[in-house]
Amino acid sequence: MSHPSRSIALFGTDEEVPPPRVLQAGKLSAELEAGNLRYVRWQGEEVLRAVSFIVRDKDWGTYNPEISDLKVSEGADSFTVTLRAVAGDAEQRLSYEARIEGTADGTLTFHGKGRTDSGFLTNRTGFVILHPIEGIAGAPVTIEHTGGEIDETTFPEIIDPVQPMMDLRALTHTTPGDLTVRTLMEGDTYEMEDQRNWTDASYKTYVRPLALPWPYRIEPGEEIDQTITVTVNGAGRENAVGGAVSLRAGAALGPVPPLGLGLRPEDARTAREAVASLRALNPAYLVLHHDPRAGHDRTSLEAMLEVARALGADPWLEAVIAATDDAGAAEEISALGKTAHDLGDPFGTVLVSPAPDLKCTLPGSVWPDAPEAAALYDATRRAFPGVRIGGGMFSYFTELNRKRPPVQHLDFVSFTTSPMVHAGDDRSVVETREAHPAIIKSVTQIAAGKPWAVGPSAIGIRDNPYGAAAKDNPDNIRQAMNWNDPRQRGLLGAAWALGYFVDFANGGAASVALGGCTGPFGAVSAASDFPRPWFEEHGGVYPVYHVLRGLARLQDAEMHALDLPASGALAGFAARQGAATEYWIANMGATQVEVVVAEAPALRVAILDVGCFAAAAASPDHMDGLSDHQGAFTLDAFAIARMRTGD
């Protein structure tokens, strides 16, 4: 069997991504990437996650700019970057120029000036500043408003559903390393949103208040002229550089929760054809999506139920209710309940959501007509007597946080997430794990003692609450709001899935559903109308399959934390079954990591990495092949390791 390129194995795509250029001026550094700045640091400590001049379309999609005339000059005490860029599509274009300057005294300026000849419809054009969350959440910040007023407040600890800070001209905060950072924003009025709502690892300060009309039009000849000035003061401290990561099973966290998969009618046929591989994966349940607006009916329910029965998985019904009034919704749910009864009452769990809640209602906007939540849930209980009723949001935690359900009418609360609502690059996807603890703390508060479930979640987005639809991806690239994201088929997707399950299982989720059976969120390769490089010729299972199979087999084992930081090099957990302990870990980055299990120098180990990618795709039981090992070992980029001791 031929082997895929390293890029296909890691990311599912051969798309070239130029490495960022590190700019340095004394102790001040920043990474230049696609004409914007990431990881602004002072003596190695991160002070801002990003400063970006962005151009978005009317559906909140961010254009990838075409950059030209890029010039970079650096000296020991300063750096300067100038560039020109064009952003847009066949219908509209906006050109801009930027100048970035950094000096060793801790001053960084980023000036952007844009204009359009055609007119330009946008939801946001201008600067966005990202503030990191680790060591910042709950910490003090000084606000300078546009009128000169000064307020002392804190960054939100529990995730704020709306804008925690508004009418902003400048923000001053102190880093965990005792650096004082002032961010001055000129050229427009700014406000902040808590991006942890979307699992972004940041607070975002952005141009143009959401209370103003959107989308808005930049007229021909109109000029956008904005400047961000960042000033850093303080001595700072050197960051420690770690060696091998030592693993030790920590506190018991309770049983490993059930693992589920999603299933949509569109993928029922290919899932049925892949039953042999999927049965070996052995998911505890399948979330069957049903939306009458998309033509889903009894026939499509039967097709999905056939897959669930073939897999021995508990079918959960995830039903969109199209009616927007209480009486119409009750009638629609009653009819759905009768259909389920005719099918033999297969559903022990039913989740419902009004169709309007699948779209975002931004803060300050008028909520669309929708059935009253309590009445909707009570009607579901009447139509499906004796089953568990779940509710919340079929879209993201953001919408759950902004429209909280009456939990007294529910048996459990549910929501999903995607790591690429705002950014589609690899590092942003991986960094979203840093926001999971805050999501867990917030959803536990919202659930008010009721169980909560998360998923089906994947890297790609199931739907786009913020625009017309998720992005098609015929060129198989990394981009925000992808429906068919290439990393679902790569090792990065497998590492992300393991980290995701670990985070939410550790946090108390009653169950976790990831991705799907086949299709854009699938674990098994199947014929499709989107690109699947290498798999189109060879088929097989994706790397994520092996992770999901391993997690499903550990259900109800005693789960133990490994105390790995969310921003660290590894994600993983330990599970104890009798005298044996099983570890699953993933390298969450593109560089190698040395690993040692402190409490068990003698192990049996199975590895999933680039070197065995092709063999693993052809062998669903690849991770059963444990080999004896002693001492430390090295994990390649986004590699997965399964380890056992004590058998």
Image: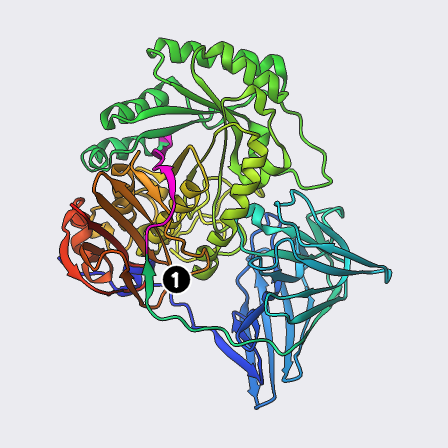
Q: Position of residue 278 (x, y in %)?
A: 23, 36
Q: Nearer the viewer, residue 415 or 353?
A: 415
Q: Position of residue 267 (x, y in %)?
A: 33, 34
- Which quadrant, please, contains the N terminus? bottom left
Q: Position of residue 54 (x, y in %)?
A: 61, 62
Stretch of the chain drawn in magenta: 248-265
Reading the image, the residue beneath label 1 is: 569
Instruction: Decide: few, some or many residues near mark 1? Use Cα within 10 Å; few <14, some 14-19, many ≥20.
Output: some
Amino acid type indicated by mark 1 = Ala
Q: Residue at x 48, y 11 (%)?
A: 383
333 up-or-down from 67: above or below: above
Q: Is residue 559 magenta?
A: no
> Is residue 510 among what the camera can see?
yes
Q: Nearer the viewer, residue 91 or 458?
A: 458
- Secondary structure state at the residue bearing disc 1: loop
- Which quadrant, please, contains the C terminus? top left
588 up-or-down from 339: above or below: below
Q: Nearer the viewer, residue 518 or 203?
A: 203
Q: How is the image coloured?
A: rainbow
